[in-house]
Image: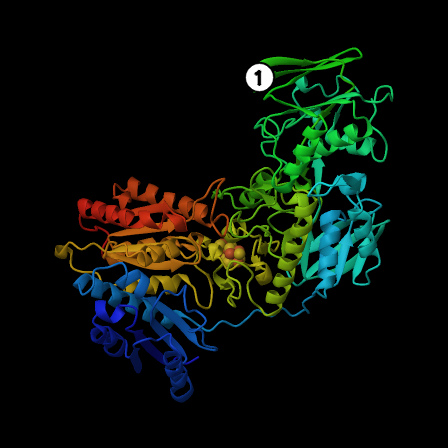
Amino acid sequence: MEKKKAVYVCSGCGIGDALNIEPLMSIATDDYSVPICRTHATLCSREGAAMIKEDMAKEGVNTIVIAACSPRVMYDVFSFENCIVDRVNLREQVVWCQKPGEEDTQMMAEDYLRMALAKVEAMELPVPFKPEQEISRDILVVGGGLAGMTAAVEASKAGYQAVLVEKEAELGGFQKKVGQIATMPYKGLKENQVVPDLIKAVTSNPKIKVYTGATVEKSEGSPGLFEISIKQNGATAEHRCGAIVMAAGWKPYDPAKLDKKLGFGASPDVITNVMFEEKFFGVNVTRPSDGKPAAKVAFLQCAGSRDPKYLPYCSTVCCTTSLKQAIKIKAHNADAEVYVVYKEMRTPGQAEDLYRKAQELGVLFIRCQSPEVKADGGRLAVEAADELSSEDILLENLDLVVLATGMVPATAFGPDISKELLKAAEDEKKEEALDVPLDIIRRSNILNLTYRQGPEMPALRYDFPDSHFICFPYETRRTGIYAAGCVHRPMGIGSTLEDAAGAVMKAIQCIELTSKGAAVHPRAGDMTYPEFAMQRCTQCKRCTVECPFGAINEDEKANPLPQPTRCRRCGVCMGACPERIISFKNYSVAMIGSMVKAINVPEEDEEKPRIVVLACENDAYPALDMAGIHRMIHNPWVRVIPLRCLGSMNLVWIADSLSKGIDGVLLIGCQHGDDYQCHFIKGSELASIRLSKVSETLNRLALESDRVRFETVSIIDYHKLPALLDEFAERLVEIGPNPFKGW
Ligand code: SF4
Ligand code: SF4
């Protein structure tokens, strides 16, 4: 498209008081020959927006630079159809964080305007991705337990068809084995009607197609276009689905793996909480060894749970389940002696009612971190050091010991094949090791994805198919596939119903955005996607291996096969590609390079080092805005360039910056590691790995690696930023002029 540019400078919100607007505008008109450049006292007002629209209509303006407030605000006002728009953040990141009227403040504003003009020059209008095949609006639900059935029902209520696949012969999942439940506020135990009601709702619903005794043999394709093969009774059924809800459930922690002192296996009368549900469904509690009534029972909480050696997390429902089971014994035999030995009782919300009720019924509670079960012939006892009374307690002649074991997600089973997958990529490309952080990918045979990056969901910790734990609680790391219920995290009935409804709403959102050619979270609505100049591809596999979302398959010659509807538009592949052949219509290696080149670098004797800050747009850039909102003055020598993700950082930007005469490059991204906050999961970690290679090279050449620094922040760290920027600037002054200038 032939670009007709216009620049609009707002003088409101203190911008006009702190800056000299005329020279700023002359940069656009004189240096960049922009034909239309206007200023307005409140550009975000109806009149301001009308002025821009009028230029679009009458003058044919189609490429606009708005120099006003942060792009994180007023985005609805400054969104114009079929128009390239960039925003210069004069308010939060210039006048609110710099001294008004100073030369350095004016220089900063002028640089940002130059950078924006260079940026729009390199930008193109996005053309939404439209697949050739018709997008399906059906939702595949894997798992016919509480979560899966709820997801299918909720999908149908929203007008979508669901295909429900359950591996067992009947619907119901684990909850089918649970005879009684306690509702809150506590009014007694009642028959578990949740599952029968849901089975009825599912099987009588014409919008839900149910396959029981069936498995997903293959999930091919991508959001909107998943081709699903379902195997049932030796036959295969095919469905095209737009999104997937994975509600594959959980399995109890294997009690045989527990510490021997908990007594599992030493006596048939030592059972788990799950075995209790299965054995005593609709019948009274008896001794498994001889069927006599159980009149003296001990429940041992956290059997292996919250213990790094076994199951490091809390399964959230074991305490309430033991209370329910204790009440069941008491309800049948008020004289029964029932003990609960606990580390801490966890009864959130109204489950506290249950705790109180058990106490009223005479259940005794012993706080002990490490009880021991003694099984000697037919005699069963528990020794417990009671922390509250400081006494050693011996519970003798027990009829039954119930171990409260935790939940393990269905994704935790099967061998971890992540190293195998990476090795397969490396073997074929022998000269270079692909240095990437590995996920856990198990061959758990739940979805059987035909993804280059593995057949199942990647997991980070404890095998839950995790995504961003703060911002995207429903998402997994495979676009269009949402986890629900206990495969997602341990949860009880109420939370499962909510979780399943949430997951299916995300699945619907994915289908609707995909059908418009737009990205899902976190860049929801983004119409761009990565484009590959394949004639220059060397089949190095960096893009396929580094994409955090499995969005690029490979053909047999190792050519990348991008799957745009799986793509989250993070740009990690763009940062990874050594040939620099991956770009987006409005985000490219060349575009950022031209922004760097647009920065005005003062002469060395001015002792005003220039610092390029490559800031992740998800946390670091908003943190800089926050510093401005709090009027925290920061270093005037920095020039911030927002990146979609630090993982999209291409090393050439560092080389370009140093050779341009920029004295230092500061990368600010999200925290990585187990408590990662990176919105694209691996981006910031990949950037840090790439950067370590630059630092190694600089050190090897005895050049100052201090010129390039990597820092992680979250939005709430905004107050640390001014000191961080000052400290980096001081270090650059210390190490002196940039020797790379002009390289
Ligand atoms: S932009 Fe991100 S999600 Fe999309 S293909 Fe590249 S690395 Fe994968
Ligand atoms: S990283 Fe670039 S050169 Fe390597 S396979 Fe991907 S597109 Fe080709």
Locate residue 261, reporting x and y percent: 66, 17
Locate residue 641, reporting x and y percent: 35, 59
Locate residue 208, reporting x and y percent: 79, 59
Q: Quadrant of the N terminus?
A: bottom left
Residue 486 visible in the current orientation: yes
For the point 71% across and 58% down, which residue is it?
Answer: 154
409 shown above or below 230: above
647 shown above or below 373: below
Locate residue 377, reporting x and y percent: 79, 10
Report the residue that reaches farthest toward the top: 376
24 shown above or below 569: below
Badge 1: residue crowd in 10 Å (few <14, some 14–19, many ≥20) = few
Which quadrant of the structure image shows residue 253? top right
Find out if the beta carbon at label 1 lies less than 8 Å from the nearest ligand 1 atom: no
Q: Amino acid at mark 1?
A: Ser
Q: Nearer the viewer, residue 597 or 55?
A: 55
For the point 27% across and 54% down, which residue is it?
Answer: 632
Which quadrant of the structure image shows residue 239? bottom right
Instruction: Answer with left or right where residue 279 lies relative to residue 354.
Output: right
Q: Secondary structure at mark 1?
A: loop
For the point 82% across and 53% down, which residue is it?
Answer: 211
Report the residue that reaches farthest toward the bottom: 58
Residue 538 visible in the current orientation: no
Instruction: Answer with left or right where residue 728 lies relative to residue 55.
Output: left
What residue sits right under mark 1 in the picture? 389
Q: Nearer the viewer, residue 230 or 202?
A: 202
Q: Nearer the viewer, residue 699 or 445?
A: 445
Q: Quadrant of the C terminus?
A: bottom left
